[in-house]
Amino acid sequence: MSSKSEAAAMRELRQRRRQAAREKWCQRFKKWSWFAVLAEAFLLALWPPGATIALLLGVVFTLLRFRTDKEFKYRHFPFDVPVCLFILISGASVLGSPDRGFSFYNWYNLVGVYALTYFLVGQQVREVKQFKQLLMALGTSALVVILYGFYQYIFGIDISAMKWVDGDAFPELRKRVFSTWENPNILAGYLDIVICLAFGLFVKADSKPKRIVLGTFILAAAACLAMTYARGALLVIVAIFILYGMVKDWRVLAACVVVGGVLLLADPVLYERLASVFTKVDTSSEMRLAFWESSIAMIQDHPFLGIGWGAYWMVYPEYDFYLQGADIRIVHAHNLYLNYAVEIGIPGAIAFLWYLFGTMIMALRQKFQPPAPEPLEETPFDYNEEAAADVELQKVAESVKQETAEPVIPFWQDFAGWLDYRLLAGLSLGVGLAILSVALNGFTDDLLFNIPSSMFLWMLAALAATVAAVNAGDEDISEEE
């Protein structure tokens, strides 16, 4: 063999080795980045710093995957424009802050985490099996949160010194669970989201075992929600179920009445707590009204760039109409819409609401159809009308037999097996209702001030976008029918 042919063979061998190494690293980055997504989803409610670490690792591996895998292309979503506007305008609000260094630090830490979560989940979730794995991670984490909430309620936590309730207005209220979250109101907002997700899957479930598992989970989450005694979150989830029952299925409305009645009869303190919304005003309600009045004044004075990201606690003393110099730090407006308008201005708030409500409407309006059956292959040479009729009758008979038969399938296997279009339909409905719960809770509280809650919302928004992309046929789906 000549030296030239030997050199060519060596070059080809090295090229093959490099290609094999490249493919190996592509698979590694794909696996590691997906594990990071699952880790973030699982740890978000249990250990937020761990979720942030998983997020950063996932972003790094995703960027490396983009660099090494030529088939892995960046995807654009319908609401990328308002997302970018929100990021840019909220960053510009730093210029109006009384402490630009503090606001900039908060902006790139918090908004950066939200944007990276949206990027990571949106780019990584591309197959139906990934939706299943992600929902399993979120569901397992939520189950731990709920069980820990039951543990707190059973063994007792005296919250009288935690300033979460007006002791004069509610002297009998001594227990408000908060589980792994900062306080009962944030836990209640999280449970609203979880209940909506499970309810969407429950509605689209195609078997009894699925409905049993999801229904039991919803009841446990509702009981834990009642243990928070968070009036706003309780009324929000009731309003969502009533609205859905009136529009879609009256049985949901009846179930809501039954479950709500049982909870109120079992716990008179819960009834008193909810009735106080319509019968009397405690200090928490008075303070919210005062905060809203101060927030409106801030918006009037800083309508375009706001007071600066995260600067509410610094500016509020200048607009203090209620506390009058009391040694209490007020960190947000207790209203989602006012808080964004105060800190990043009206244009920034509009960009965020465009993204929030646009995603919600997109998720609720998605239509999912079962895959069409494949047509029979026919040729003009072997077609026989009587034979074709016999084949059709045989198929109908087999179909009826399959529908009436009750194959023995293990409970866990039946729950794990979902038809693709039903899973996506349930997820889309659940995400849409979950975002609606955030929007309704936003009238009386700003749950997004809590970092894990915001990360969770941005993760759900990315899931809604990926579901829409898959439903539109942008990705290959392996049907399981």
Image: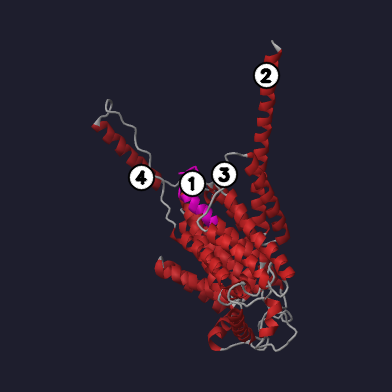
Mark 4 or mark 2, whichever is nearer to me: 2
- How far, Cα to Cα, is label 3 from label 2? 33 Å
Q: Is residue 467 found inside the magenta-colored segment of the image?
A: yes
Mark 4 or mark 3, whichever is nearer to me: 3
Identify the disc placed on residue 400.
4
Residue at the farthest top position? 1
Give the quarter of the image for residue 28: top right
Q: Which callout, 1 or 3, points at the residue further toward the start of the chain?
A: 3
- How far, Cα to Cα, is label 1 from label 4? 34 Å
> Please, what is the three-letter code of the amino acid marked with disc 1?
Asp
Find disc 1 in the rendering and name its residue. Answer: 474
Residue for point 69% across, 33% down = 21
Residue for point 57% across, 85% down = 276
Tag 1 near tag 4, CB within 8 Å: no
Find disc 2 in the rendering and name its residue. Answer: 9
Q: Residues within 10 Å of mark 2 (few under 14, many from 20)?
A: few
Viewer-side residue, 262 vs 440 = 440
Q: Secondary structure at mark 2?
A: helix
Identify the disc placed on residue 73.
3
> Please, what is the three-letter code of the amino acid marked with disc 4?
Val
Q: Which callout, 1 or 4, points at the residue further toward the start of the chain?
A: 4
The N terminus, quarter of image: top right
- How far, Cα to Cα, is label 4 from label 3? 44 Å
